[in-house]
Image (cartoon, rainbow, N blue to C red):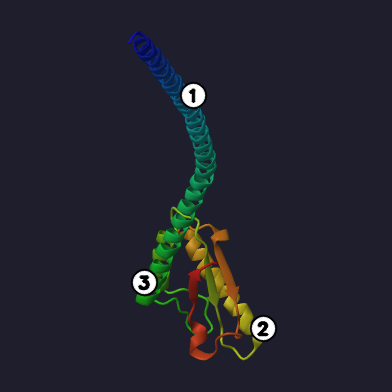
Amino acid sequence: MFVSLASANTETAKGSSNFMRRTIARTVSGVAIVAGLVAACGSEGENGAAGSSGTNGTASSAAGAPSSGAEAPASSGAGTGDAGQAGGEAAQKVTAAIQQALQQSPITFTTESAELSEKSKSALGEIAKAMQGNDVKIAVATHAGYPDAEKSKALSEKRAEAIAAALEGAGVAKDRVKTEATGNEKAQGDKALDTQITVAQ
């Protein structure tokens, strides 16, 4: 009976010892796992922070560079666009005024004359008004229908000068009026009595 109890105690001791070893092993293993997880989370946090910081830094600098780079051209482009648009609107305004004025009173001359009628002067005055406050230039084409080319050229030049002078008298600088005296090259007969006025390109 004593032997049995001793044996049982020995078995119990062995069992307790094994149990303790397993518990310690599990505890150590659990601690190792936890430590590993903590370390892993810490490194991920650092990498994430660095990555996020790097990404943000890169993004902000990338965004900063294009935005600053894009702002200058955009503003200068906008300025150019505004100037171009303003110039286009002024040209359209002058073109409309020319069309309206010539429709109401075409700039014509009597045969063998370079004298402007009062209606023609009034029409030129309306065109001159539309040319105020902008730098739009116009082209004036005059003709003369003589069979003699030299005589036609001379008369068409006088007609062009008369129109330029009338516009200058109405406040349009001379260098804004481009004259083209074609003589009898582009118009003959009654058509040579008419004058064409357009916005210069």
Q: Residue at x 53, y 69 (%)?
A: 139
Name the one closer to the observer, 160 or 68: 68
Residue indicated by mark 1:
39
Q: Amino acid at mark 3?
A: Gln
- Residue 175 shows in the view: yes
- Asked if the residue under mark 3 is in contact with the one under mark 1, i.e. CB atoms within 8 Å, the reply is no
Q: Nearer the viewer, residue 82 or 190?
A: 82
Q: Residue under circle 2?
A: 150
Does residue 171 show up?
A: no
Mark 2 or mark 3, which is nearer the start of the sequence?
A: 3
Q: Is residue 1 above or below residue 74?
A: above
- Provide the secondary structure element on which disc 1 rests: helix
Give the answer, above or below, for where 115 lies relative to 7: below
Name which residue type carries label 2.
Glu
Cβ atoms under marks 1 and 2 closer than 8 Å: no
Which of label 3 and label 2 is nearer to you?
3
Residue 3 lies, in percent from the top left, at 38, 11
Tell me if residue 200 comes above or below residue 56 in the rendering. below
Looking at marks 1 and 2 on the same chain, the residue that comes earlier in the sequence is marked by 1
- Hey, what amino acid is under mark 1? Ala
Which residue carries the number 3 mark?
100
